[in-house]
Image (cartoon, rainbow, N blue to C red):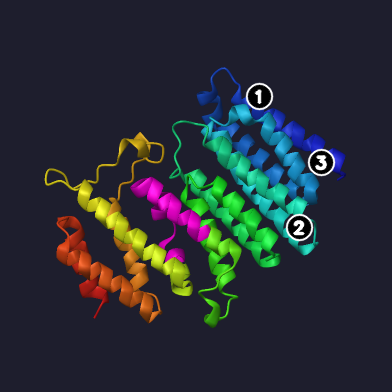
Amino acid sequence: MSQSAAKTVLQNIFTFATIVAQAETPAVTLWNEESVIRALQWASYCRQLADRLCGRQLAITLEERLKEMSHLMDNHFLYNLDLQFLAQSVTILIEQCLTASRSELQFSTAVTVHMNILKDRMKSCTVSHDDPMVKEHGRLLMENLTLWMEADGSERCKIQIVKIAKRLSWCSTGWNILLMLMAIDMSKIEESKKNHLGHVINVIVSWFTEETRALGPACPLWRADPVLLASVAQRCTCFCEFYLSALEQQMELLEVSYSSQSTCLQYPKECSYFWRSREKPDIPLYAVILQHFLHLLQTEDGVVKKKALALVSLKTKCCVFSAWTDLAKDLIRNLAY
């Protein structure tokens, strides 16, 4: 199939999707059996088409169609199908870019498709960074950036990835991308040079420090992958110091927030952007912080483990926050000895 013919097929498929979504009774039309089957066939056709198109042309085609369908983003059924197709298509594109040594421009264009999906998804006031589709697409984006980093590894590539991560700082995906970048970068640094890290690493640590101080409990860092955080802390002395300091600061904020009338953390009003009304975390922040300590105490680095244990022990002895104290005592009893 030629690229022009493929584009025509793709246009016809998206036209069908638009007709279905704009039906007078979309709820009935979308959820009857025939429409569901047709929509699934549409997604299947798109995936097959992605196999035939390659390089920058696919990314451009996807972006063109995405813009045409931007008004459908609130339709969760079609949106989710569209998201699955785009995620798989962009993954195919990135693999093709790597195997065929295509240009950075082509790779960046593919990543842009992921970014646009996330940005458009967040336009809805009812969606937060805990939204399942945001998390899933963030995971796919992170996998693709990891491929890019491992294939390129240049300082310029790292700086580009840092920029992408900062644009996603409202959700844990942005923080996970930065941590992944640090972990890959530091795995190539000799043990004797752990305290003399490159420019990109210093920029990341500085930004982490600023954001955690500014946002406090609402900082998405605390929803980032604690395994990644512990891994980076184990490899990077300066990040370990920052990480433990940030954990201690959060515990102090918890103590201030705690009141005998309530066992739930009261989030400040300025954090409402991050914890929207229907998406407030079920797990209290003190339990999240304990999870971070759990992974620090399970690292193979004796120095990191000792520092984390000392901090947990200290806070357990002087903290008036009873829920924290009980959990911390259990943690120390199960892991420390």
Does label 3 or label 1 sit earlier along the sequence?
Answer: 3
Image point (85%, 39%), residue name = 5
Give the farthest residue toward the top.
24
Residue 302 position, x and y percent, is 37, 81
The answer to whether residue 200 is magenta is: no
User: Of residues 136 and 250, which is closer to you in this image?
Assistant: 250
Residue 311 position, x and y percent, is 27, 68
Magenta residues? 204-230
Count of numbered labels shown in the rendering: 3
Q: Identify whether 332 is placed above or below 250.
A: below
- Separation (CA) of disc 3 from disc 1: 20 Å
Does label 3 or label 2 sit earlier along the sequence?
Answer: 3
Secondary structure that dominates the magenta span: helix
Instruction: Quickly name the residue at label 2.
Output: 97
Instruction: Quickly name the residue at label 3.
Output: 6
Badge 1 element = helix
Residue 297 position, x and y percent, is 33, 73
| Label 3 crowd bin: few (<14), some (14–19), many (20+), radius 10 Å | some
- Separation (CA) of disc 3 from disc 2: 19 Å
Which quarter shows the N terminus? Answer: top right
Q: What numbered label is drawn on residue 19?
A: 1
Amino acid bearing label 2: Cys
Instruction: From the image, state whether disc 3 or disc 2 is nearer to you.
Output: 2
